[in-house]
Amino acid sequence: MKELATEFGVSRHTVAAHLRRAKSPVRRRGLSHKQATDIVALYEAGGTSRELADRYGVSADTVLRALHRQA
């Protein structure tokens, strides 16, 4: 949504509204509990926050927040 908003010069909220009206599936923001649990295990096994962010399609900050919540 962020990329679409930038491309069309509108807010993410506007993009989301258009997607809802079109009944287009919208990916849930953030991580599920299972993903967060998996991230902790993968991080403890040596994965980096950047690698995990890329793997789960989220920011490194989201990965770090998940790690802190699970600690």
Image (spheres, helix red, strand yellow):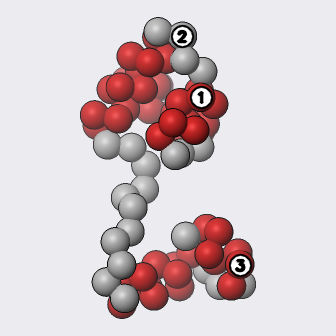
Location of residue 35 in the rendering, given as x and y in whole percent from the top left corner: 35, 35
In this rendering, does residue 53 appear at all? yes
Q: Residues within 10 Å of mark 3 (few under 14, many from 20)?
A: few
Q: Residue at x 39, y 43 (%)?
A: 31
Mark before the other along the chain sequence, 1 or 3:
3
In this rendering, does residue 71 appear at all? no
Q: Is residue 49 above or below residue 23?
A: above
**Residue type at the position of mark 2:** Gly
Location of residue 59 in the rendering, given as x and y in whole percent from the top left corner: 59, 43
Mark before the other along the chain sequence, 2 or 1:
2
For residue 7, which numbered disc appears in the image? 3
For residue 51, which numbered disc appears in the image? 1
Q: Which residue is mark 2?
A: 46
Mark before the other along the chain sequence, 3 or 2:
3
**Residue type at the position of mark 3:** Glu
Location of residue 42 in the rendering, given as x and y in whole percent from the top left corner: 44, 18
